[in-house]
């Protein structure tokens, strides 16, 4: 490792290779703070050529390579794990080399005539939409982390967001990719669809840095909607709100967003920001439709009608841009407000068929009671995506273990209800131990073959997404931490 570090310094410049313990401490976890492991080194390349050199050197010395954007992964996708001689992920004693993409941060082209932009992987999501202000276009994937997370990270996790209900998740907005493979070759895919080719862009999107390091992205630009209509409906229970959600979608309306908050999180939001929610409100839906003005009033009327029919005691309709912003503010501030409820929390992420939303939220509460962990909920309800926030105190190991065990049980319940263990945050290290509960051995074997084809030496982000074999996975994952 010392030789590798000195060669990395010779290639990238001393200041672009971090190896002092105090510098590495910043990179020992991402937004999933339950597991930590220090990398051996962190490198800050500023061009694809430098990424290639880094991969060549890591390959020569057998060090693993962990791509990192903004480090907002909630699944421990950036946890630096080394690798064993057989290519599998090591138990955490060695870390790998973290490749920070934050200096590949140029917006290279806004090509409005072809509704396309070309960006380097480290560009923050929101920066692209800000750069498009006044053009009539935006970048549709809008993860709540969009002020920090990078487009490369969004591609690697196939990120979603409140408005992806109507507009689709990241994969629907990626036209082409430039990336560096585990053998240090550079692959360029797209941006023009070739119907005769395999969909490698689709394959790489969501691969969590295990198949390639993304360095450049060609993204689709979406025209701004003509108008919006935003509403907020207050219900006595999650059941009522869930039924309204199912009915709205069944009626053929696809809102741009349909977000749910339960009583627990509403109490925190109310205490922090005083939006005026009644203390006994059981659930709130924030719903937005957008599109050509002509159709919006009819859709809004229908939605208000469904909400009232399913028990909404109040439906507020924003009548100005400021009122719309205020309606969204209560949803956007929700996760931050939980800081008032406990010193630490972890955000789970699962998905169920949307008609099962009330069931999973009811089961989540039961699971919380069984494990003596308080749980509050936000959900991208229109997609059936749930984000239970499990509250605990990280200074108390027993609380951490109980939160991990409760999170695992919630995800198993999602599988039992016909859903999946991730809606948008990815598998990372957190959920790798559950992959064999979701997929058959043959499915996992096929994924391993794909991984091997892209990265035969197993250098890229070992211990993430795809269990190494026979369901071994990484024992420092959620399962390991729970035991
Ligand atoms: C407050 C908060 C709200 C969030 N809200 C949402 C949400 O609404 N929707 C959602 O989907 N997610 C959400 N997330 C999760 C997270 O922001 C997303 O997964 C995001 O896409 C990660 O981007 P990043 O740049 O931070 O990537 P990182 O966290 O740095 O990395 C994530 C994964 O991608 C890999 N990776 C990163 N960059 C590259 C690259 N250039 N090439 C190859 N692999 C790479 C990493 O190895 C890792 O496996 C939220 C997180 C937080 C903290």
Image: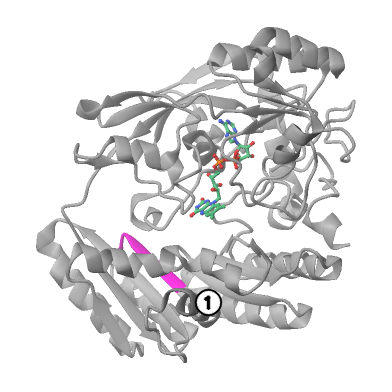
Is residue 249 visible to the viewer in this orientation of the structure?
A: no
Residue 141 versus residue 200: which sits nearer the camera? 141
Q: Which residue is identified by label 1?
A: 268
> Which quadrant, please, contains the N terminus?
top right
In the rendered image, the residue lying farthest to the left is: 294
Taking the spot 20% from the left edge, 27% from the top edge, the residue there is: 113
Residue 352 versus residue 428: which sits nearer the camera? 428
Taking the spot 58% from the left edge, 51% from the top edge, the residue there is: 425
Magenta segment includes 210: no
Residue 466, quarter of the rendered image: top right
Element carrying mark 1? helix
Q: Where in the figure is residue 427, as x and y percent of width and height?
A: 66, 49
In the rendered image, the residue lying farthest to the top is: 10
Question: Which residues are the magenta region?
Answer: 254-260
Q: Where in the figure is residue 442, as x and y percent of width and height?
A: 73, 44
Q: Where in the figure is residue 52, as x and y percent of width and height?
A: 62, 14
Taking the spot 87% from the left edge, 32% from the top edge, the residue there is: 94
């Amino acid at each position: 490792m010392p030789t590798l570090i000195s060669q990395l310094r010779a290639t990238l410049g001393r200041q672009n290779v971090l190896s002092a313990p105090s510098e590495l401490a910043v990179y020992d976890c991402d937004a999933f703070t339950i597991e930590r492991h220090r990398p051996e080194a962190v490198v800050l390349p500023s061009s694809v050529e430098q990424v290639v050199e880094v991969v060549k050197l890591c390959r020569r010395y057998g060090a693993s390579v962990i791509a990192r954007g903004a480090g907002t992964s909630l699944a421990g996708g950036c946890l630096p794990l080394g690798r064993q001689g057989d290519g599998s992920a090591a138990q955490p004693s060695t870390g790998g080399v973290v490749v920070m993409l934050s200096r590949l941060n140029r917006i290279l082209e806004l090509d409005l005539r072809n509704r396309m932009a070309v960006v380097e992987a480290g560009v923050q999501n929101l920066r692209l939409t800000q750069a498009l202000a006044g053009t009539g276009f935006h970048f549709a994937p809008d993860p709540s982390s969009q002020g920090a997370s990078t487009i490369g990270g969004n591609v690697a996790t196939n990120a979603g967001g409140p408005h992806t209900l109507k507009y689709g998740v990241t994969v629907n907005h990626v036209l082409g990719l430039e990336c560096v493979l585990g053998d240090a070759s550079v692959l360029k895919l797209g941006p023009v669809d070739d119907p005769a080719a395999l969909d490698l862009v689709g394959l790489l999107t969501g691969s969590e840095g295990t198949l390639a390091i993304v360095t450049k992205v060609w993204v689709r630009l979406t025209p701004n909607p003509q108008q919006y209509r935003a509403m907020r409906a207050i219900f006595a229970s999650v059941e009522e709100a869930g039924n309204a959600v199912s009915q709205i979608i069944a009626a053929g309306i696809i809102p741009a967003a349909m977000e749910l908050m339960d009583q627990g999180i509403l109490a925190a939001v109310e205490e922090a920001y005083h939006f005026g929610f009644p203390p006994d409100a059981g659930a709130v839906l924030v719903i937005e439709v957008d599109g050509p003005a002509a159709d919006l009033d009819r859709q809004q009327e229908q939605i208000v009608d469904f909400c009232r029919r399913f028990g909404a005691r109040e439906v507020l309709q924003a009548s100005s841009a400021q009122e719309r912003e205020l309606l969204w503010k209560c949803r956007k501030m929700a996760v931050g407000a939980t800081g008032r409820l406990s010193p630490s929390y972890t955000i789970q992420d699962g998905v169920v068929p949307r008609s099962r939303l009330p069931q999973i939220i009811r089961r989540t509460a039961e699971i919380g009671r069984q494990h003596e962990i308080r749980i509050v909920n936000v959900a991208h309800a229109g997609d059936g995506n749930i984000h239970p926030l499990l509250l605990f105190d990280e200074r108390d190991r027993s609380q951490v273990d109980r939160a991990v065990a409760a999170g695992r049980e919630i995800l198993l319940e999602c599988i039992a209800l016909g859903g999946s263990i991730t809606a948008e945050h990815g598998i990372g290290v957190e959920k790798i131990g559950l992959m064999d509960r979701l997929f058959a051995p043959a499915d996992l074997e096929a994924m391993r073959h794909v991984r091997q084809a892209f990265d035969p030496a197993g250098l890229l982000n070992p211990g993430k997404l795809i269990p190494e074999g026979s369901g071994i996975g990484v024992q420092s994952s959620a399962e390991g931490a729970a035991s």
